[in-house]
Amino acid sequence: MSTESPADGAGRALRYEAAAAGAIPLVRALEVSLAGERIRRVPLPTDPFLGPATLNVGLVRGGVAPNVVSPHASAELLFRTVGDGAPIRSALRVVEVLVTIEFVLDVPAVRLHVVGGFETAVFPYTTDVPLLTRWGRPLLIGPGSIHVAHTDEEHLAIDELHEAIDIYESLARRLLADREA
C-alpha cells in the first residue's frame, strides 16, 4: 500500500538577515521543515512478510531567492505501507498545527500469486497491480532492475530481454498446464 501526502505551508517572504535577527519567530517554510523532522520520527509498522513500511520525501518545492526565507514550501511524501494506512494517517495529525496535509492516494499492499519453480522476492516498492482488478490472479514479473525503473536511468540489456522472453514463455506454459490439470 502507498499513501501519498502533500504537506504545504505558506507565509510571507523575508530576507534571511531579518529572520536571523529575530524579526519573526518562525516562517511557514521553516515549519514545513520542522514538520518533516517530526514525520521522520513517526513509528512505521512492520509486516513479517512484507517488511517495514518506508517513507520517501519525493518532491520538495519552495524558495524565492538564495537570500530570502521562502514564504512557501511544500513536500510530497510517499509512505510504502504494509497494511492498513489508517495508523500512519492518524500519526501524521500531530504536524497539522504546522502544515496542511492532504491525502491524495491510497494503494493497498498486495500479496501476489506465486508460481512454483520461479524465483520470488519482496520489494519495498508500490505497484499499480492492486488497481487492476479484472485481470485474474496477479503476477508481477519483468526484466531489468527495479532500482532504476521509472527513472532517467531506466534501461535493459539485450541479454536481459532474451532471458525475459524465455521466462515469459516458461511461465505461460506452466500457467496453461496448471489450468488444464
Image: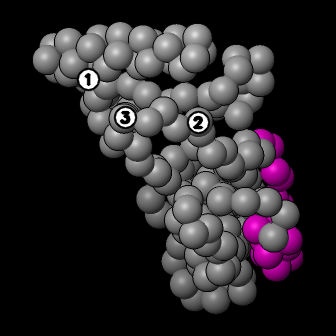
Q: Along the line of sight, which residue is nearer the eye, 146 or 65? A: 146
Q: Which residue is mark 2?
A: 113
Q: Along the line of sight, which residue is nearer the eye, 108 or 173? A: 173
Quarter of the image where one finds residue 169: top left
Dot 3 amino acid type: Phe
Q: Is residue 167 above or below residue 58?
A: above
* Distance in Å between CA atoms under marks 2 and 3: 11 Å
- From the top left corner, tell me how far across and down residue 86 is, in percent: 84, 63
Q: Along the line of sight, which residue is nearer the eye, 30 or 2? A: 2
The residue lying at 51 percent from left, 47 percent from top is 125
Q: Residues within 10 Å of mark 1 (few under 14, many from 20)?
A: few
101 to the left or right of 150 = right
Residue segment shown in magenta: 88-105
Q: Which residue is mark 3?
A: 118
Q: Residues within 10 Å of mark 3 (few under 14, many from 20)?
A: few
Looking at the rendered image, the disc whose residue lies closer to the viewer, 1 or 2, is 2
164 to the left or right of 82 = left
Contact between labelled residues 3 and 2, with CB atoms less than 8 Å apart: no
The residue lying at 20 percent from left, 12 percent from top is 162
